[in-house]
Image (tube, rainbow, N blue to C red):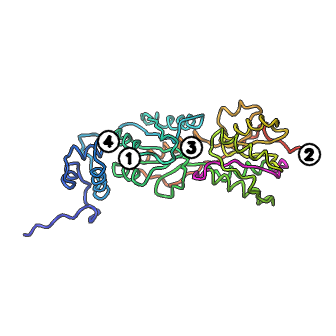
Amino acid sequence: MTATQEPSASENPQAKPLTIAQLAELAGVSTATVSKVVNGRSEVAPETRALVEDLISRHGYRRQRRRGGPAALVELVFHALAGDYPIEIIKGVEQVAREHDLAVVVSQVQHQHVAGTGWIEGVLSRRPTGVIAVFSSLSDEQHEQLTTRGIPLVLLDPSGDPGHRVPSVGASNWSGGLSATRHLLELGHRRIGIVTGPDYALSSRARLDGYRAALDTAGVPVDPDLICRGDFLIEGGRAQAHRLLRLPDPPTAIFACNDGEAMGVYRAAHELGLRIPDDLSVIGFDDLPTIRWMIPPLTTIRQPLTEMAATAAAMLVKLAQGDPPPQSRVELGTDLVVRSSTAPPKRP
């Protein structure tokens, strides 16, 4: 009988994933080197790391049983840790994590909406049960590294369109933008400014589209001068509000696309000697706990951040158990919360 060469996993989908020893033999390196790549260690030459990652991608990786399963951790990564937003997210994830005896590890990617290379090395070394990326995204290479290690990923309030490849949880941002603008229109405002978030943010674009849809439905022309590109930060809201309020025909109301920007609008109004809501109506988006202490209390769109986070964590646990979610994208509803920062415009 003549022996035949066994086809590789790339040629035979039924072939088993390879062990560290088999990957090392194919790569022509030591098992220790492959182990360092698999576990996210940094002391490997870039060319060697790329070679091993390519082999893992093409052939798969079978962890030896003696190493045990994944750590009882949920890796929660933020683009930045500041303000109430991450606190509400952490609350929701911890609610579900406790039910499943999981700890939560929190990291940030320094205001980048795509996680850097150093972050993925830490995740691979910790070998968590799964990863939740908040208002950020992963590169194709990082996603492939998680997939080949069997580490599930869920995107929460993703900055870009996740498509159907990665499960995600978000809010009905378009409906929220529509409701915010419609509320101001119903009060009688026709000069309505908007301070958006950054262009790359899916939520920002959806809220702007909702604003435009409300104006269009009401027969109010969209004035490009009233649309300011913001950054979801307080100082950005202040700066853009100054620009809007110094127009020859300034707005009588401003829709800030998050509560932080709304705080900046309040500051700009104060600096220009305007009273809210007598001279200017302001509406935000998020309904974070601290904004109820603003003077006057802020009208806003409630985004159910804690519930969104709990939904993402529950989805992650199911994925880790080998149970794919029935739908890849879940959107929770938003609600208009009327307080004292909006009122009919002053009569000329």
* Mark number, residue 151: 1
Q: Which residue is mark 4?
A: 42
User: Observer-nearest residue: 181 or 222?
Assistant: 222
Q: Nearer the viewer, mark 2 or mark 1?
A: 2
Above or below — where is 52 with respect to 237? Answer: below
Which residue is rendered at x = 67% and y = 46% of the image? Answer: 257
In primary-sequence order, the first of circles 4 and 2 is 4
C-alpha distance separating marks 2 and 3 = 41 Å
Q: Residue at x 48, y 39 (%)?
A: 108
Q: Residues within 10 Å of mark 2 (few under 14, many from 20)?
A: few
Q: CA distance from mark 2 to mark 1?
A: 60 Å
Q: CA distance from mark 4 to mark 2?
A: 66 Å
Q: Which residue is mark 3?
A: 308
Q: Is residue 196 magenta?
A: yes
Marks 1 and 3, Cα distance to the nearest angstrom?
A: 21 Å
Q: Does 309 appear in magenta? A: no
Residue at image point 38% right, 36% down: 72
Upstream in the sequence, badge 2 or badge 1?
1
Residue type highlighted by circle 4: Ser
Give the magenta range.
185-203
Secondary structure under tag 4 reads loop
Q: Nearer the viewer, mark 4 or mark 3?
A: 4
Dot 4 alpha-carbon crowd within 10 angstroms: few under 14, some 14 to 19, many 20 or more: some
